[in-house]
Amino acid sequence: MSHSRLRYLCTVMGAFAVMIALAGCRHKPAPAPPTPPPAPAPAPTITLNADPTSIQAGQSSTLTWSSQNATKVELNGASVDLNGSQSVSPTESTDYEAVAYGANGQTASASAHVTVTQPPPPPAPAPAPQPSIQDLWNQNIKDAYFDFDKSNIRPDAQEALQADAEFLKQHPDVDFIIEGHCDERGSAEYNMGLGDRRANAVKDYLVQLGVDGSRIRTISYGKEKPFCTEHTEACWQKNRVGHLVLATPAQ
Amino acid sequence: MISRTFRRRVWLVLCALALGLAPFPVSAQQSVYIPITGAKKLRLALPDFKIGSADPAANSLAQTFDGVLWNDLYQSGLVEMVSKSFYPLQQPGTPTDLGGGALAAWSAAPTTAQRLVFGNVVVGNGALQVEGYLYDLTQPNKPFVLGKRYTDQPTPAAARVIAHEFADAIIAALGGGPGIAESKIVFISDRTGHKEVWMMDYDGANQQQLTHLDAICYSPRLSPDGSKVAFMELSSAGSRIRVLDLLTHRYARFPRLGGTNATPAWSPDGSKLAFSSSRTGDMEIYTINANGTGLRRLTYSPGVDIAPVWNPKTGAQIAFESDRTGLPQIYVMDADGTNQQRLTMSGYAVSPSWSPNGEALAFSWRRTGGGEGNGGAYDIYIWYLANRNYLQLTHNGERNDFPSWAPDGRHLVFAVGENESWQLFTILADGTSPAKLTTAGSNTMPNWSWH
């Protein structure tokens, strides 16, 4: 056993003896406490709340206060009950302060803030409803009419389709269908072909004017869906047509 | 088949022309208008079949049988039916009824028949039995030509079928080739409110609806074996070719090709369809295998090429209509698209149908003017390919369209525009014996079965 280990052991044993001696001291009786001083008069307290804290001009808010140990309460300088509530309708943002007075001249105070906002201006007159694409289509798009047994784009149809192309380029997200129609005369099977030629002639012309061909679907109805059913040239002319139809999203 | 009589007649007219006797203007294309003159036909007597049983059903069944047989023989175009008011009082039911001089009464005036068809109808034991005979009265010592016995259900439908079968047997015995009494016609009718495909017997009986698509159907064409019908269906999705199997009532798989697809036509072996498609932006003629594979483009001509029809005899040529020069005209080409030739040189010519023997085309033609912007008459013509002669079949001042040959080559069915509706008629290839087949709704685009 080394010399240092021996000294450590002696120190521990010595400390243990001191602890035992101290433990014996706790059993001595405690001294009597000193007599307390006389209680001072209690200080007043007060709370003040506004509900709601934010109103529009013309609306009202309720102030509620509650005091303790007060002999008198003033709200913004006016004497009020010690506890109570009051409705206020400030026209602009206002601070409210409640002061409680104690018996020996002590005071306490609390404040609340009511924010007053001005009512929103009357709503602006509703903007005119945006015309739907179908409305615009109906107002702007013109059909291309054809001579009998012909599928070439004649001058009046060129004019109509040039205006159509401008509209179509301004609405590049719109897909559409070109229907080819024929009048009631001639052979029904052949007119399926003639109607197809008319639809494709209109498509080709629009593509030439810069309209994206992938937006266009063509269909021939031959003489099956006439716009007019009288047996007159005026009526037949209405039926010899390349008719432009807005594609519904489903299509 | 064009009857030999008829070809002889054409030949006679050509002889007359050669002799400078042409009474008809010759057109710039050297086409000739060939008139029809009355031909001497065999006079055939057909007394009502004798009722050989007391069953009350026999009366009405015999009446049905007699009516259908009379009409079949009358419509055959081969014989002249001797009016019943000229018949002897005695009604033969069996060969023994014609013994002892009774036969001679039929060939004597006023009957003066050259052929006699007679027989009997018996209903008994839940069956209808019909016995029928054809006698050649110009051979009084050996008049028997044909004897047939049929047994079937005692129903009007069965009586009708027996009459058709017996009529075809008589027509074959008279040298008229295959009869058409059991043939069918498909067509388009709007009587339900939609243009659907319908089918009927050649005489207009048994009209039945085949499709229920609520769309617009066009151009039905029966396959050569009669088991399928190809047609065009037009809806807001576009027009496409459909193939309906008549046995299973199911639609065959067929590709959607894009654009307008119209006027299918079966090759004579049933393996291919020719049709018109604008899948490239212009209506051109294509062929495709019946199972939808092997699409092949035949024409490359700007304009409408439509309404193809195969030469049913050879399968080596296709006729079609094209407006590549203006108004539509009839063209013929080889089945691979080569050797395209224009036939008609004026007016407005549409809807070709090729005769069963391959020798003639029928089509609708307004020889001057015509077209969508030009009303007036369109007539059915027959155009003989060998010599470019043509024959006008209709003269009714109406719109006549969509001729289709019967398998016997002696008949055609076509549509006549009457006021606001179209109705179907059959007619002999010499322009005689028109018979109206339809009355309900508007009926058009008929196609006669191949057999």
Image (cartoon, rainbow, N blue to C red):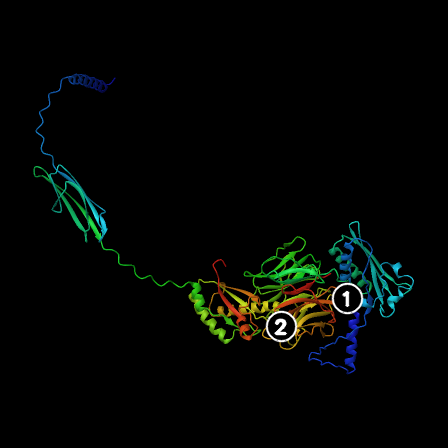
> Residue A31, image x and y in percent?
11, 20
Find disc 2 in the rendering and name its residue.
B328
Image coordinates for residue B149, horizontal then vertical, percent: 82, 55
Density class for disc 1 (Cα within 10 Å; few <14, some 14-19, many ≥20) is: some
Residue at 73%, 80% in the rendered image: B24
Which amino acid type corresponds to the residue marked 2 in the rendered image?
A: Pro
Quadrant where the C terminus of chain B is found in the figure: bottom right
Q: Which chain carries label 2?
A: B
Tell me the distance, in whole angstroms, between the alpha carbons under discs 1 and 2. 36 Å
Residue sitting nearer the eye, A208 or A103: A103
- The answer to whether A143 appears left or right of A223 in the picture is left
Nearest the viewer among B240 and A119 is: A119
Q: Earlier in the sequence, mark 1 or mark 2?
A: 1
Subunit ID for the residue under disc 1: B
Would you name the residue on which mark 1 appears?
A: B74
User: Residue B8 vs residue A249: left or right?
Assistant: right
Is residue B118 shown above or below A146?
above
Q: Is mark 1 on a helix, strand or loop?
A: helix
* Quadrant of residue A120 within the rendered picture: bottom left
Give the quadrant of residue B116.
bottom right
Tell me residue A159's x, y (percent).
Answer: 47, 74
Q: Which mark is residue B95?
A: none
Please indicate whether residue A165 sits to the left or right of residue B158 in the image: left
